[in-house]
Image (cartoon, rainbow, N blue to C red):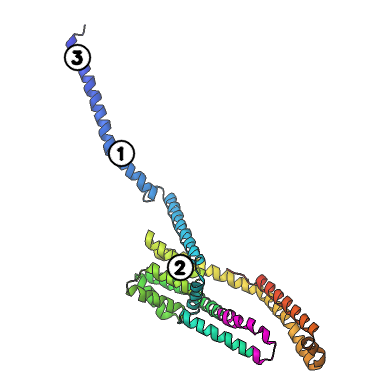
Amino acid sequence: MIDQQTIIFIVMGAVAAMLMLGGGIIGATYVIRPKVLLRQRMNQIGVIGDGRANEQRSESRRQKRIQEKVKQLKQKNAKKGRLEAINGLILQAGLNINISTYFVISAGLGVFAVFGYLLSGLEPLWAIAVFPVGAILVPKYVLGSMGKKRRKKFTTHFADATDLIIRGIRSGLPINECFNVVAREFEAPLGEEFRLLVEGQNLGMTIDDLMAKGIERLPTAEYKFFAIVTQIQRQTGGNLADTLAGLSTVLRERKKMRDKAQAMAAEAKASSMIIGSLPFAVAALLSVVNPDYLMLLFTERTGNILLGIGAFWMTLGSLVMRKMINFKM
């Protein structure tokens, strides 16, 4: 028979063992749980864990940031007013004038167009319609053409400038010095744009603000890619040279595809130019062979109506052909 004292010792030993086991479990929980939580958090942000999964998560976050930046740029451009749009055209053309000077020049062109119309001896009533053509359409067309040529010149050597920046970063140069090298080695507008980046940073401006101004001056897809990638890389970290190398590959592929599209559309452009110039060539020949036969179009009212209808359909056909053979990439 087990006496009462032995039973008490056994019960007390069991209770002590259970208390020790419970204390050990609780202590282990307090010690291990923070580490587990820390590990889970680090795994979520991509510090540890499966390398491929971390890379995919990092790439997904980078793509999300890029999409947000592109969306912000589109919203910013959509909110531009009339004066801001005109100021943007002036910046893209590379001119150093303000809005007031632009309006004065536009008004002068409008007045000059009216005087030219009146001196030609045509119907004075239509002089009112000539003024907005000279004051609004002509300046915008000139600024648009200048901006287009400037953007094209910038894009031509932008991939080479990106490669130069990549080589500079891999050789140990800071990014600002790489921009300075590009500013010295390339002509305007490419060299001028990077010179403004360097000077702005020397004056204490942030790279984000400087590139935002650069996008206003040169709103090309290539420069937007470069600005967004550089800004995101500065925020998230990583190897900037590898990121820019991928961007350089994309830029060269875009240029190659653009050149291929232009080569394929060259024949259609030549055909449209020939078709568009045929009526004028025939009119010039008729004016030499039989001028009286052709002058009926200008002296008779029916001829004037026919000329107007022909000009309308010629303009419409030219716009349709231009839309068909011009590819935006």
128 left or right of 75 in image: right
Residue located at (47% from left, 57% from top): 63
Whether residue 290 is visible to the viewer of this picture, yes or no, is no
Quadrant in which residue 208 is drawn: bottom left
**Mark 1 and mark 3: Cα distance apart in space:** 37 Å
Amino acid type assigned to the residue bearing label 1 in the image: Arg
Over which residues does the magenta segment extend? 117-141
Q: Position of residue 221 (x, y in %)?
A: 51, 68
**Point 36% across, 72% down: residue:** 176
The residue wearing badge 1 is 33
x and y percentages locating residue 131 in the rendered image? 60, 83
Query: In screen coordinates, is 269 left or right of 307?
Result: left
Q: Position of residue 323 (x, y in %)?
A: 66, 71
Q: Nearer the viewer, residue 296 or 240?
A: 296
Element assignment for label 1: helix
Question: Callout 1: 10 Å neighbours few (<14), some, many (20+)?
Answer: few
On residue 231, the disc is none
Above or below, 260 against 96 in this view is above
Residue at image mark 3: 8
Residue 124 counted in the magenta span: yes
- Residue 29 located within the stretch drawn in magenta: no
Tell me which secondary structure the magenta stretch mostly adopts. Answer: helix
